[in-house]
Image (cartoon, rainbow, N blue to C red):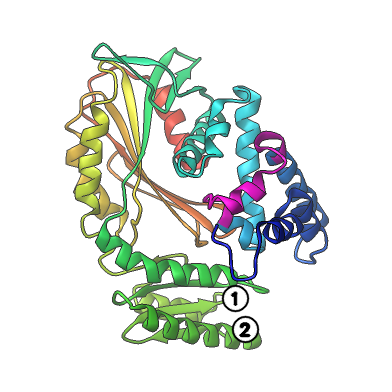
Amino acid sequence: MRLFPGETEETRLQYLQENYSWASLVKEVQESNKYSDLDKRKIKHAFKVMADVFGSEFPIEVMLNKHPLSKKLVYKTDWSRYWFVWFSEMIENIRSKIGDTNIFKEYKNPTNAKEKYEVIRNAHRFIKAGFDVTIEPEVKVEGKTKRPDLRLHNQDNNDEIIIEISEVAIADQQKEAMKPFETIMNFMMKNNHPHHLHYGGRLNKVLSEKTTKDVLRTIQEKIIKLQTSEICQFIDNEEITMGMSIHLEKEYEEWMKKNSLQTGSFSSPDADVNEIHRIKRKMNGKQKQLPKGTQSILIIYPHFFFGQTPEAVFSKLEEEVYKYDNLLFLAIISEVAISSENSISSKGEHRFYSQNTSLLCNESVYLFYNKYNNLPITPNTMRKIQDAFRDY
């Protein structure tokens, strides 16, 4: 972290200890009136679990080393504190079945943190679904030793599945579209209090930094009006179309439908221009790393994947899935900091699951089934896999 004028290493460490030590984080929650007594106990326990696993100085290290977790520490809001409860539950689940795996140590490295978080996230979901899970097992691929992210074993029938998890790197055009989008999403997360706001919208063009600031001022004015009057508010101009509500009144629902918007959805123009092609390339590369003759699941996290219907995504990618004989499922998982209603839809044997994993955090799973997969698999294992993505 860069030192600010007049700041020294000593004053910085003192500030971080006072504001971001485990003890100060617990104190912040205990003194807040935003949480029930039960929630305070849950959050305190979450911090204790993380201190046990990652160490007493971990939050200070997070802030000093620009670890991805720093954003959730900085936002001292209920959604971020509930996220720690959710994350700590995953950690406890993995520890209870596997023990103190190296994945936790690897997560502490800021460079690897996002990748290792995705491994933790998916190990948790498959353990909950009833699989025995091995993290980073050793396998042979064309005579060479490889370490895929997960191996699943179903004790009911001895089915085994190898899982590779990957992220599609962000493209330059996505960076341009994503910057104003993330700025607005971060603003909404910080200003979603004291009332829980329901909202949805879209940016109508890629915004400059100055225009983004103008849009934020407009949004702030509407939030103030909404929180004061509790009457739904709307924005519809060249830059942004957006609806906000506290009570989901009929006027709000009708306006959202008229403008083809959904609560819990926020999109940016042309954000996924090449994302389908980039996912195809990622699939091709990752398939070469998987052992032949073994069922496999490929999980891909695109960097920016909004504004498309599940049916459109399935149509664009299903033929690519069918190319790979030992690929059982492709799961494309999109995470966004917005709350929406849980939903399930399907196209043939493909499934779309959308669920809120914690307050203001939504996960959408596009699960492609390869109907041309030529390796044996039992219905029991198929059901457990679908349960894992749908329920956990």
The residue that mark 1 highlights is 247
| Callout 1: SS | loop
The range drawn in magenta is: 51-70
Q: Is residue 49 left or right of residue 391?
A: right
Which residue is more in the foreground, 69 or 360?
69
Q: For the stretch drawn in magenta, what is the main secondary structure?
A: helix
Q: In which quarter of the image is residue 166?
A: top left
The residue sitting at 57% across, 32% down in the picture is 105
Q: Residue 199, position in %: x, y?
A: 49, 72
Q: Does the magenta stretch include residue 351?
A: no
| Callout 2: SS | loop
Badge 1 or badge 2: first in the primary sequence: 2
Note whether residue 389 is visible: yes
Residue type at mark 2: give it. Answer: Glu
Q: Distance between the residues labelled 1 and 2?
A: 8 Å
CB under 8 Å between discs 1 and 2 = yes
Q: Residue 386, position in %: x, y?
A: 42, 35
Residue type at mark 1: give it. Answer: His
Q: Residue 236, position in %: x, y?
A: 38, 85
The residue sitting at 59% across, 22% down in the picture is 98
Q: Does the magenta stretch include residue 62?
A: yes
Which residue is more in the foreground, 237 or 254?
237
Give me the disc on residue 230.
2
